Structure formats: structure tokens, C-alpha cells
Image (tube, grey):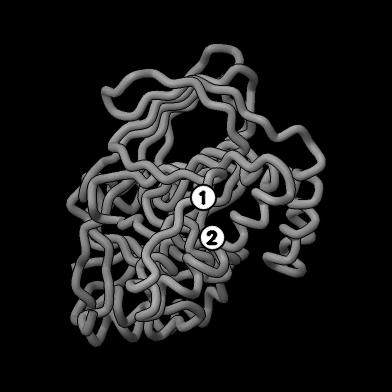
């Protein structure tokens, strides 16, 4: 058995990680680990392909959400295990899978000794203004609207210095714009509908940074997307949304009281489920995948690839 580490050199302490990987691989009886560095020119796809060419059995993705997304896209539907060494600001997939954060020893021990869990992968085709179509994958969420505008407005230098607090300034910038989306959409083989909304999010799982539970019923292995349609009109609706997401989803639903209270519906926020969502936008809009901006789109189609990834989780889980 042989593992490879695909790592972002900016996100990890390479010497420290190499020491732990070497020790854990030896204890588990694995061959010497291979190392592949990402770069601005190759953020992970080429590195992962080289690991696959070496016929490794396990790839450890060491970096932020972008690195994990690209490695996962290359490993999808392959007979190769994926392990996570969370090393970014968000670490969204690791959070949604309840994996340990900021613990190199535990993460690497899990990589070599854990069990596997099959999870779904989201696939998306993004249509650009010039008519071209780009194909990508995502693990957590794809979104258009205020979340994508926020990410486009985020100062990366500021994010590197103060982490998620850099999003606060970006949110204020995004809220100043006209955030009305006008689109036609179709869920699975259902009828095409018109929609005016603020934000549309297609979720493979539901927890954001800060333990915010945005999509409370989303599961990463159910073969379905949970789709959020956000349609606030005025401060009253925004207060309802904040109460729903932060208080009801974030607090009440996580206590025994949540089962007694039940789910409260609000006009400005709707949840639906589907295996496929197709949308065409009246005007080009920013789009994001797993917290990274992917430019402007005039339409997109998302589909679920059930059980496409085999991810290492702790054996005791």
C-alpha cells in the first residue's frame, strides 16, 4: 500500500506534516509516501493526476477547501481513498463530516488506520456569457446571489491576515448592490418555473464556517441536493432569516426541544430537494463553489454523483 500527499505549501508546515506522515505510514506497514506540491499554475489537478499515475491507494489532501475540491474532482469514481488534512480557513467538508480540525496527528492517523465512508459529489456545468460551458465538481455547496457576490468582493490579503472576519467587509459591499436574481429553473424532470430571488444555494451538505447550519436536513450521502431559495423583501424578512438560520437551525434544532417545536416555515426562505437543478439567468451573475468564486454565469446545471468518493474517517466513528 502506498499513499500520496497533495499539499498546498502555503497552508501547511511541510516539515512537521512530513514527520507525522512518515511515522504513521511506517507504523501501518505502508510503503514510502509520495509528495506532490500544488502551485498557482496547478492548484491540484495535475498533482493528483501524477499521484494516480503512480498507482497510489490513498491521496491525502493537505490544504484549504479549494485544494480538497480539486483533489476530490480528480479522484471521483476511482478506486482510490481520499483523506483530509484540514488546513484552511473554512475546512467545510471536514466540518460537515465531523472530522478533527487543527490536529495533524489525528488526521494523519485516520488517513492510515481509519475506515471509509462513501459520500456524494456535486457536478456542475456553468454556462458563460460567451456561450462556453465549464465543468467542475463541488463537495459542499454551489451558489449564486449574495454569497457569491460576497466571495467576489473578499480581499484575499485581508482574509490571509484575519481569517473569516474579512468576509464582514465583503458582506457589507455585497448588500449595497441590487441583489435580485431573475431566473427560470427546473428541478429534476419537473416543470420550468420563474423565480425572483436574492440567493440560490445547491447544497450537498449544510454546515458553514462558524458552525452555522444553513441546510439543516442536508446529508452528504443521501443522493440528493438540498436547495435553498432566499427571497427577502426588507429588514423584516432579513430578521426572519437570521432567526431561522442562527437561532432555530443553529441552536433549537440541536437540542431535544427542537423535536418538540418542529420546523417553522417563513416566507422569505424555502427549502426543496432534487437530484438535478437546471437554471437560466436573465443577467450574468457571480457563482461560487465550496467558498471559491468561479466568475460569472448565465446558467448552470447541477447533478448528484452518488457515492463517488471514498473518504477516510476515524475507525471509532
User: What residue is at 31 percent from the left and 56 percent from the top?
Assistant: 220
Does residue 295 appear to the left or right of 175 in the view shown? left
Compute the Cα span from label 1 to label 2: 8 Å
Residue furthest out toward the top:
131
- Closest to the observer: 247 or 126? 247
Q: Quadrant of residue 253 in the image?
A: bottom left
Residue 255 percent coordinates (x, y): 40, 79
Q: Which residue is mark 1?
A: 266
User: What residue is at 30 percent from the left and 78 percent from the top?
Assistant: 110
Name which of mark 1 and mark 2 comes first in the sequence: 2
User: What residue is at 36 percent from the left and 78 percent from the top?
Assistant: 108
Does residue 217 appear to the left or right of 189 in the view shown? right
- Closest to the observer: 27 or 226? 226
Residue 87 percent coordinates (x, y): 53, 69
Image quarter where the C terminus lies is: bottom left
- Closest to the observer: 213 or 161? 213
- Closest to the observer: 110 or 35? 110
Residue 262 percent coordinates (x, y): 37, 65
- Can the viewer see residue 142 in this picture? no
State whether residue 5 is above or below residue 24: above
Residue 17 percent coordinates (x, y): 47, 78
State whether residue 263 is above or below residue 174: below
Q: Secondary structure at mark 2?
A: helix
Q: Residues within 10 Å of mark 2 (few under 14, many from 20)?
A: many
Q: Which residue is mark 2?
A: 244
Q: Secondary structure at mark 1?
A: loop
State yes or no: discs 1 and 2 in contact (Cβ < 8 Å): yes
State whether residue 39 is above or below residue 231: below
Q: Residues within 10 Å of mark 1 (few under 14, many from 20)?
A: few
Amino acid at each position: 500500500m502506498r499513499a500520496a500527499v497533495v499539499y498546498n505549501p502555503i497552508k501547511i508546515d511541510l516539515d512537521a506534516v512530513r514527520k507525522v506522515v512518515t511515522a504513521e505510514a511506517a507504523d501501518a506497514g505502508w510503503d514510502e509516501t509520495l509528495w506532490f506540491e500544488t502551485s498557482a499554475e496547478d492548484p491540484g489537478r495535475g498533482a493528483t493526476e501524477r499521484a494516480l499515475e503512480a498507482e497510489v491507494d490513498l491521496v491525502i489532501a493537505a490544504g484549504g477547501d479549494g485544494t480538497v475540491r480539486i483533489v476530490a474532482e480528480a479522484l471521483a469514481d476511482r478506486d482510490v481513498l481520499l483523506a483530509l488534512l484540514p488546513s484552511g480557513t473554512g475546512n467545510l467538508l471536514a466540518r460537515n463530516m465531523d472530522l478533527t480540525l487543527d490536529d495533524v496527528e489525528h488526521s494523519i492517523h485516520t488517513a492510515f488506520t481509519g475506515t471509509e465512508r462513501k459520500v456524494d459529489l456535486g457536478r456542475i456545468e456553468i454556462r458563460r456569457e460567451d456561450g462556453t460551458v465549464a465543468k467542475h465538481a463541488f463537495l459542499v455547496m454551489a451558489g449564486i446571489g449574495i454569497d457569491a457576490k460576497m466571495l467576489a468582493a473578499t480581499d484575499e490579503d485581508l482574509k490571509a491576515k484575519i481569517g473569516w472576519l474579512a468576509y464582514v467587509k465583503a458582506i457589507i459591499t455585497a448588500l449595497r448592490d441590487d441583489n435580485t436574481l431573475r431566473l427560470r429553473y427546473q428541478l429534476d424532470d419537473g416543470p420550468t418555473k420563474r423565480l425572483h430571488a436574492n440567493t440560490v444555494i445547491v447544497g450537498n451538505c449544510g454546515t458553514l464556517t462558524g458552525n452555522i447550519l444553513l441546510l439543516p436536513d442536508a446529508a452528504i450521502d443521501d443522493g440528493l441536493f438540498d436547495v435553498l431559495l432566499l427571497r427577502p423583501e426588507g429588514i423584516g424578512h432579513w430578521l426572519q432569516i437570521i432567526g431561522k438560520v442562527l437561532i432555530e437551525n443553529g441552536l433549537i434544532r440541536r437540542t431535544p426541544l427542537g423535536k418538540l417545536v418542529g420546523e417553522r416555515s417563513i416566507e422569505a426562505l424555502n427549502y426543496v430537494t432534487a437530484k438535478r437543478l437546471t437554471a437560466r439567468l436573465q443577467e450574468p451573475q457571480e457563482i461560487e463553489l465550496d467558498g471559491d468564486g468561479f466568475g460569472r454565469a448565465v446558467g448552470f446545471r447541477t447533478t448528484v454523483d452518488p457515492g463517488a468518493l471514498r473518504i477516510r474517517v476515524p475507525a471509532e466513528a
